[in-house]
Image (tube, helix red, strand yellow):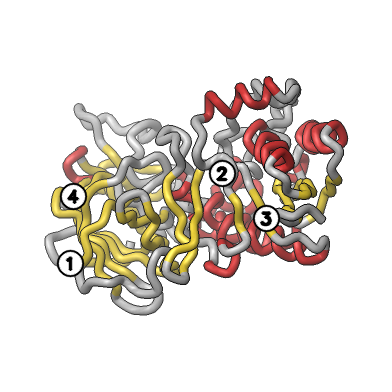
Amino acid sequence: MSKKGRVLVAMSGGVDSSVAAVMLQEQGYEVIGITMKTWDYHRSGGNSGKETGCCTVESMNDARHIAVNHGFKHFIVDIREEFGDWVIDRFVDDYMDGRTPNPCVLCNTHIKWAALLKRADNLGCDYIATGHYAKVRAENGRHVISRGHDPKKDQSYALWGVDQKHLARTIFPLGEYPKTEIRQIAEDHGLLNVANKPDSYEICFVPDDDYRRFLKDRVDGLEERVSGGKFVDQNGKVVGEHEGYPFYTIGQRRGLDLAMGKPVYVTHINPITNTITIGEKEDLVSSTLVAGEMNLVKYDKIPEDEMEITGSIRYNDDGAIGLLTQLSDTEMKVHFPAGREAITPGQAIVCYEGDDVLAGGWIKKVNVGMEDLIPA
């Protein structure tokens, strides 16, 4: 084993994880590549004739090709059962409960890191590494995630749920680099099969990016169960019919098919009554949220009763100034004095202190009045 140790690198077959593996090898680590098969492409439906994203035969072959060319081992592991139970089932459940899920965060929190470390232990690896654009450091007995150098590619938002014991063995080789430089490094190292691969933005198990179709395939009789629901305005007046509450998301404007004479948006979803409330843009603004399943990252408890933070409420959100209060070991409240548009139950709130991830959690409740917090 090398002096720096043995590292298991999660390789999706894309440019980021490929460069991460080669970079770590150059830095003196003994690298082992691993590609995780998380889902069955053909069972997912939505086959447009072209496989995209991770878990495809092409992606696995690209990862293996790079490993062979650079002289390190590569394995493919099947985690479909683990992935399906945690990620796909909760994805469906969230939509059926009127929430909008974030499966990438779920995967990182419950599947990817645990699966990687299990295999790392089996292979005698000291560390695991991924191609995420983020940083991690040890400080005051904690392992702290911070934003990546490239603000356009920063992925720290998706990592708030990773356990401290997992972060202790995690390396993010790309955290200090902009994406343009990573593509150049790929070319310089002859990784021509991945250097110019486009970034993948779709949900890996919904390759056609049509979550409505996916839900219909997964839930028997869904359309019949939820069709004929009512659109209501802010006063509760019925203004139209919709196709079913799971097929809409907070903040949605397109596809409502309502002739209101002005732009209107989904402001609230009630799965019990199959009712969707619509309103104008200003009706999307909320100021307070409560989040559950909280994970503390920088500190073992929030250091102040009410702490000023920058709160991001979705991926690629620049964030806004908020006040964080820890309610319990698992819950926190964030108040945004200036309000935020389309705070969405099921999404994550990630609280930053500067560039450091302070804490994160799943948005459970959103206010509809000045003080009134209701289950969303």
**Quadrant of the image for the N terminus?**
bottom right
- Neighbourhood count class around disc 1 (C-alpha, 10 Å): few under 14, some 14–19, many 20 upward: few
Where residue 213 sits in the image (x, y, percent)? 59, 40
Look at the numbered discs 3 and 1 and tell me whether their residues touch, using CB distance below 8 Å. no
Quadrant including the C terminus = bottom left
- Whether the residues at callouts 1 and 2 have beta carbons within 8 Å, the answer is no
Disc 4 residue crowd, few under 14, some 14–19, many 20+, Cα 10 Å: some
User: Above or below — where is 46 with respect to 338?
Assistant: above
Q: Give the number of the mark in front: 3 or 2.
A: 3
Give the secondary structure at mark 1: loop
Task: Count numbered badges in the picture.
Answer: 4
Q: Secondary structure at mark 4?
A: strand
Label 3, secondary structure: give it.
strand
Report the mark closest to the observer, 4 or 3. 3
Q: Nearer the viewer, residue 179 or 264?
A: 179
Pointer 2 residue: 132
- How far apart in space, not on screen, are marks 4 and 3 (Cα)? 39 Å
Q: Are there few (<14), some (14-19), or many (20+) residues within 10 Å of tag 2?
A: many
Numbered badge on residue 339: 4
> Of label 1 and label 2, which has the lower sequence position?
2
Q: Nearer the viewer, mark 3 or mark 1?
A: 3
Among the two numbered marks 4 and 2 on one chain, the one whose residue lies closer to the N terminus: 2
Q: Which residue is mark 1?
A: 372
